[in-house]
Amino acid sequence: MPSTYVEIAQDYITRVLAGDILACHWVKQACLRQREDREREKSDPTWPYKFDGEKANDICWFVEGLHHIKGEWAKKRKKIKLEDWQCFIYTTVFGWYKRESNLRRFKTAYNEMGRKNGKSSMSAPIGIYMMGVDRESGSEVYSAATNRAQAKIIWEDAKRMVDRDPLLRNHYGIDTSAHSIYQMASASKFLALSSEGNSLDGLNVHCALIDELHAHRTPKVYNVIESSCGSRLQPLIWIITTAGFDQSGVCYQQRSYVTKILDRVITDDNYFGIIYTLDDEDRNNWQDESLWVKANPNLGISLYLDELRAEAKKAAQMPSELTNFLTKRLCCWVSASMNLFNITKWHALGNPTLTPEQFKNDPCWIGLDFAPRNDFSSRCLLFRREQEDGTHYYAFWKHFLSEGKVDESENASYKGWAREGWIATNEGNQTNPDVIEDDIEAIYADGYQVQELDADPSRVQGIEQHVAERTGGLVVEVQQMPSVMCLAAENLSALIADGKIHHNGDPVMSWMVSNVVGRKKGNWGLFPDKERDENKIDGVTALLIALSRAMVNEQQAFVLPSYISV
């Protein structure tokens, strides 16, 4: 039997990779990463990192010296008992050091799992340790959130742990006040920090504990924390969160970064990450109780099967509760409360080798959603091709936004999408309609088989007139009415389900598809909409406008004038 915390962690890795512990892909990848790193440490003397088993054990020993402060275990004055998976996380994050400087390797640790898996009780001890045990002079530790109530959750747990343990206070010289945990000898402090009640200027962060990062509607707090760690030699940003809805936010950005690290798409030796969730293929079987442990490593310890069963039963009977169960209990990211389209299947239909040039001889429709000049506009080029199993559609987009709006956006992905060419930008703070006109006219000039330019006349501000005059092409005014958009959305859902619409994996469009929710519109069905203004869906609107026309009976004869309305 393993006797040290490091041995417990190693045993956990072995059982996960052998399949003895049911785990998702990301947990397996995190375990595999640690195993490969340990092997590399032994075989490659040039690798700049070493694993210090004694220090890895120390953090676990410290945590297990603290008392529970909630529930029955607190009443019985029980000390914390770490589970195998917790030993794995602690020993990995705190066991690796740089060979030359002997400073910690990991500066960020991202932990994602379902509710009630002991997130706060894992995080609070780290705050105490980093403030009073890490030998950092003037250590500044913060429990950080966007509002004070959330920021105080971990901090208050830590305060209770310190208050309950006189040996801890006496040995390390740690004490508490109404709003601070502090160590006078090292001039160190542990505070709750929020953008709501604190100035975020002038921080010198040694450790930040960020709870429920998915709830951060803007990256403001995270960005300030990250930038304020620069003068520390071995800072730690400790993130612990459940899944959420906003796939444009800072949390999903960090999560996506972690998945790329774990899948070896990118290398970042200073970033630790682990995600406890269902695998994609499990989502349709979310009621299978045997899968729940994938998202809940503490199942049977800090949360119980009967509790999850009751919530699952409610979710099965009330669709409005399903999203909450998937995100909070099974740690599955769901972009909105009533997603209109299947984002998993949408991703599967993406093919980065597809280009518009491959379809020059196929009929195409140009769908245009022109927004106010200070917002997104999107153009969709939709091709129709007949194949043995029926009609297939192929879609490509161009998104437009001014450089000023890209720079000031709180969506951290905008700048990256602009650099990669997915967003076309122009100077200034307003989208230049001339850029859009030039783009559409170039499609005509390049010899594409354009059947018509389709746009909402209330929004295009004369673009359709200019294009018609310059190209002689047919322009159809498509109003975004329930009678048009509900049917188009229903048809798009069917095409996605049947695998008959294809795209090039445009990440902006995938984000927009994930933002679409359905609003009931009388007998017309579900109208494509968004929950918040920052959840853009312009690319979807452009696609639906084009699709509403492309799916019209192809034998229909169009009138000769430049404009017709539907």
Image (cartoon, helix red, strand yellow):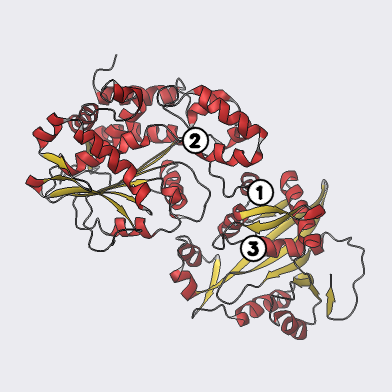
Residue 277's label in the rendered image is 2
Residue 539's label in the rendered image is 3
Secondary structure beneath disc 1? loop
Q: Residue at x 25, y 24 (%)?
A: 79
Q: Nearer the viewer, residue 154 or 548?
A: 154
- Where is residue 140 drawn, in percent x and y? 20, 51
Total number of numbered labels? 3
Q: Quadrant of residue 481?
A: bottom right
Q: Visible in this render: residue 44? A: no
CA–CA distance in space, label 1 to label 2:
23 Å
Q: Is residue 203 above or below residue 64?
A: below
Q: Residue at x 29, y 30 (%)?
A: 69
Q: In the image, what residue type sits under mark 2?
A: Thr
In front: label 1 or label 2: 2
3 or 1: tag closer to the N-terminus: 1
Q: Visible in this render: residue 219? A: yes
Secondary structure beneath disc 2? loop
CA–CA distance in space, label 2 to label 3:
29 Å
Q: Nearer the viewer, residue 330 or 524?
A: 524
Q: Is residue 449 above or below residue 500?
A: below
Please give left or right for residue 213 compared with residue 341 in the image: left
2 or 3: tag closer to the N-terminus: 2
Find disc 1 in the rendering and name its residue.
349
Q: Residue at x 68, y 77 (%)?
A: 442
Please give left or right for residue 131 compared with residue 469 in the image: left
